[in-house]
Amino acid sequence: MPDLPKQPILNTTTGELYLPTRLVYAVQKPDNLRRWFARHPSMEWDSNLKRWVWNYDRRLRKFNFPKAYAEALRREGGLVLASCYLENNRTLHVYTRCGFRAVRFLCFFDKEVSRNIAVAEFMDKYNMVSTFGAMNELRTPEDYFCDEIEFFDIPTMMDEAKTSEQKALFSRLFLERAATETVVPLNRQRLEVFYKDGPEAVDLVMQYRDLLAMAQHKSSEPIKVMEFLQSLLGNPSLMPDSK
């Protein structure tokens, strides 16, 4: 039987792979955060879905959006970059359609909102390419995060280890897992890297996620993450740009 043609890959209107991403913020001052949402000109309240949406406009040029965003704004008449839900007085969820927009939101929010009001704790990533043929209708980013999210929190495990034997055990588990880890649909990572090393470090994580997702899409077998990263190191032309 001949191979069936592959279905078209789903991209955003600005050309990125459609790989939904969720930012999870810890909120310390919910009333201050609500006031900021209500007053900022780039934020708009969606009364139907009880959320704030972050809209692209000319005020956001300083956050290094490519020309495709201005073109999409002219073409569509509007462009929603993120959806924001204050789940409760302690947790804010922000959903985007790709990693690039998630990092831009991190930068935007960090410049606009004091860290004693809210700070980003986690990034939840969907890691599988979506195609038109596999979907009866377009799923929103929110739809992708209903299943269990894999989270191997080795830093917390090491912090909570009470003996040197426990630390050695967790280190061994981490190394064993790193050697065998494959691409999973959903995983979570901590966001200390954004505050410590800046947005460039998170941009690189997102670019690697894109490359992994495409490689897995083209492969009939599960891809081991470490082996894939080692193959990139052996071929610098395939590595993402760190600038």
Image (spheres, helix red, strand yellow):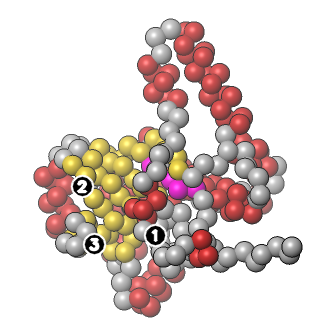
Residue type (three-letter) at the residue carrying disc 3? Ser
Q: Which mark is residue 42?
A: 3
How far apart marks 3 and 1 lie (CA) works out to: 24 Å
Magenta residues?
123-127
* 3 over 35 or under it: above or below: below
Q: Which mark is residue 139?
A: 1
- Would residue 196 be visible to someone looking at this image? no
Q: Please report the residue visible at 24 percent of the width from the left and 55 percent of the height from the top.
A: 86
Q: Position of residue 112 (x, y in %)?
A: 27, 59
Instruction: Kindly indicate whether the residue at mark 2 contacts the one at mark 3 (C-beta within 8 angstroms).
Output: no
- Please provide percent x and percent y for residue 196: 45, 41
Nearer the camera: disc 3 or disc 1: 1
The residue tagged 2 is 86
Q: Quadrant of the N terminus?
A: bottom right
- The answer to whether residue 146 is seen in the rendering is yes
Q: Helix or strand or loop: what does disc 1 sit on?
A: loop
